[in-house]
Image: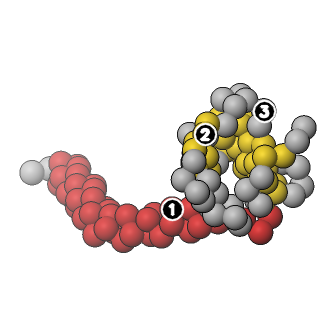
Amino acid sequence: MSKNMMLVAVAMALVVGFLIGNRYEKMKLSPMMDTLQKQVDDLKMKATSMDKTNMTGVMMKDGKMMTVWKDGKTDMMTENVTMSDGTKVMMDGKIVKPDGTSMMMKEGQDIGMNGQMMAK
């Protein structure tokens, strides 16, 4: 075999070896990356879950249930909310009072954290 052919063969062997080793390392790291991604996702969920201490209530806006914050901003509701009087407000707009009566919120309606409908 000529010297050039030998160099090409060695170079190809090194490239193939590198690619196989790189793929093996990725396979080894994949379960760790999945675990880390789950931890990051869990932390994001906790950080974005509703902090009721900063909520003033919820409202239906454009047919969607929104969380109303003390600073006046609104965000999409991400979970059902229980008000201080025991009233439950569901993400679909259903309100269930402590006595079991229920109603659906209408466009533009607000309910405060005390469970009372807020006047406009």
Residue 25 appears in the rendering: no
Amino acid bearing label 1: Asp
Residue plotted at (84% across, 46% down): 118
Which mark lies nearer to you, 3 or 2?
2
The quadrant of the picture occupied by the C terminus is top right
Label 3–label 1 contact, CB within 8 A: no
Q: How many marks?
A: 3
Q: Secondary structure at mark 1?
A: helix
Amino acid type for the residue under numbered disc 2? Met
Identify the disc placed on residue 108. 3
Label 3, label 2: how far apart the Cα atoms are: 15 Å
Q: Give how far apart the Cα atoms at labels 2 and 1 are.
A: 34 Å
Residue 22 locus on image (x, y percent): 31, 62
Q: On the image, numbered disc 2 is attached to which residue?
A: 103
Question: Residue placed farthest to the left in the image?
Answer: 1
Q: Residue at x 27, y 59 (%)?
A: 23
**How packed is label 3: few (under 14 Cα within 10 Å), some, or many (20 or more)?**
few
* Nearer to the camera, 113 or 41: 113
N-term-proximal mark, 3 vs 1: 1
Residue under the point 62% across and 53% down? 97
Which label was assigned to residue 67?
A: none
- Measure the alpha-carbon separation of dots 3 and 1: 33 Å
* Residue receiving disc 1: 41
Tag 2's secondary structure?
Answer: strand
Where residue 78 appears, as percent x and y from the top left, is 59, 51
- Mark 3 or mark 2: which comes first in sequence? 2
Q: Check disc 1: other Cα within 10 Å, few if <14, some if 14-19, many if 20+.
A: few
Left or right, 95 with reference to 42 = right
Q: Quadrant of residue 108?
A: top right
